[in-house]
């Protein structure tokens, strides 16, 4: 027990080493958008991640959403099945073990994907407060995303409203925009419980495909990343009240790899770019089962908001960075084409 306690006390995280940039969004109106843009620019070019603090989304709102997801998980299986994700779709409930990003390792988590804020996609019966509380958080994260996009426009000196207009249909349905709110619960690990076998993981090394991801989490629960320039896995740690932002693969392609993306180990050539061609820009992240007894034996909640461009948006670096002397001759694809290719690489052909 003494040795275990020592190991837990000595757990080093990026938070404990002050190795993650912190961006303060307090009082961030139009006059401060340039400052936020420059801080995001520095974070994305150097680390690929940052913590956002004083962002205006109360911890109570986020906790209410987690509580409502717990209520959903307590429902009988036949009611949960009404909202289960269908083959070929993205919206709905996903039970533990269904997703295996490496095609073999079981992933121990419950997830609920929401791509559109309506009664068809969010359970209102028998949990009316589920829809109300999660819709509130979803709209807040959508508003925050629009502000971040505006700040990025300033930093990249793109045409006014370029990013904002190209993300105008977030949460309007995946037929027009693949942005997704994902409720997540990672159960506590009980070593002798069936299904929690050795070799399981909470979330395998994977790709965030879109522009960026916003992540709220309730505790330190095993999130790890590889920072640019290293292949070492680093535990991120937990900063209470903060929201983590990380760049996605489309953003890195869009900015000609100026911005790092915490993306996965999957090797895929898209838009003339192979992830192994840019090891300093494409970095994996994962959620492991912590070794520390006090961490692994409690559940972990998180909410991820995956911000994507409208499906019809052309991911054209030459247009985004028109003043760049180095112009690309690569074929230009739409956001939908690129994202569907990544989904197919990860989960198999979704059109079947």
Image (tube, grey):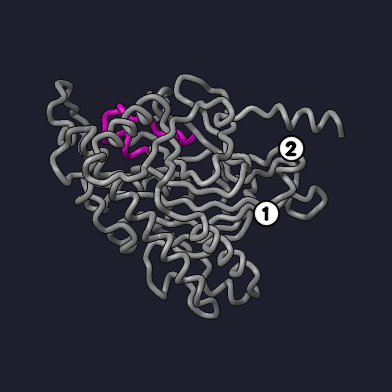
Q: Residue at x 33, y 43 (%)?
A: 211
Give the class, few, some or many, for how many residues have Cα within 10 Å of label 2's Cα (few <14, many ≥20). Answer: some
Q: Residue at x 44, y 44 (%)?
A: 345
Residue 147 placed where, x, y %? 29, 47
Mark 2–mark 1 CB contact (< 8 Å): no
- Mostly what secondary structure, the magenta segment? loop
Q: Which residue is mark 2?
A: 292
Residue 91 placed where, x, y %? 44, 63
Left or right of 77 on screen, residue 66: left
Left or right of 73 on screen, residue 344: left
Residue 268 placed where, x, y %? 40, 35
The magenta segment: 248-267
Q: Which residue is mark 1?
A: 187
Q: Is residue 89 visible?
A: no
Q: Residue at x 64, y 27 (%)?
A: 12
**Residue 173 in magenta stretch:** no
Q: Quadrant of residue 256?
A: top left
Q: Quadrant of residue 66?
A: bottom right
Give the number of the disc on residue 80: none
Q: Quadrant of the C terminus?
A: bottom left
Q: Is residue 318 above or below residue 298?
A: above
Left or right of 337 on screen, residue 207: right
Closer to us: 190 or 301 = 301
CA–CA distance in space, label 2 to label 1: 15 Å
Q: Is residue 284 visible?
A: yes
């Amino acid at each position: 027990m003494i040795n275990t306690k020592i190991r837990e006390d000595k757990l080093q995280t990026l938070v404990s080493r002050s190795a993650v940039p912190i961006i303060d969004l307090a009082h961030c109106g139009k006059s401060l958008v340039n400052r936020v843009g420059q801080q995001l620019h520095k974070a994305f070019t150097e680390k690929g991640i940052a913590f956002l603090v004083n962002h205006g989304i109360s911890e109570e709102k986020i906790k209410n959403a987690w509580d409502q997801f717990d209520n959903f998980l307590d429902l009988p299986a036949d009611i949960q099945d009404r909202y289960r994700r269908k083959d070929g779709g993205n919206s709905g409930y996903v039970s533990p073990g269904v997703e295996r990003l490496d095609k073999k390792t079981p992933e121990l988590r419950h997830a609920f994907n929401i791509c559109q804020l309506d009664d068809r996609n969010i359970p209102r019966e028998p949990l009316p407060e589920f829809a109300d509380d999660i819709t509130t958080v979803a709209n807040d994260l959508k508003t925050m995303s629009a502000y971040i996009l505006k700040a990025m426009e300033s930093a990249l000196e793109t045409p006014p409203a370029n990013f904002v207009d190209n993300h105008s249909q977030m949460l309007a349905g995946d037929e027009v925009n693949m942005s997704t709110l994902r409720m997540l619960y990672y159960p506590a690990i009980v070593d002798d419980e069936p299904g929690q076998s050795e070799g399981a993981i909470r979330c395998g090394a994977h790709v965030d495909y879109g522009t960026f991801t916003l992540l709220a989490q309730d505790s330190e629960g095993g999130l790890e990343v590889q920072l640019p320039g290293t292949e070492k896995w680093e535990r991120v740690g937990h900063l209470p009240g903060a929201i983590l932002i990380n760049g996605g693969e489309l953003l890195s392609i869009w900015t000609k790899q100026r911005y790092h993306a915490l993306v996965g180990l999957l090797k895929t050539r898209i838009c003339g770019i192979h992830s192994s061609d840019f090891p300093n820009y494409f970095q994996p992240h994962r959620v492991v089962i912590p070794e520390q007894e006090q961490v692994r034996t409690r559940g972990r909640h998180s909410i991820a908001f995956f911000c994507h461009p409208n499906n019809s948006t052309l991911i054209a670096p030459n247009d985004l960075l028109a003043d760049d002397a180095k112009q690309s001759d690569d074929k230009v694809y739409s956001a939908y084409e690129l994202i569907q290719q990544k989904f197919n690489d990860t989960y198999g052909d979704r059109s079947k």
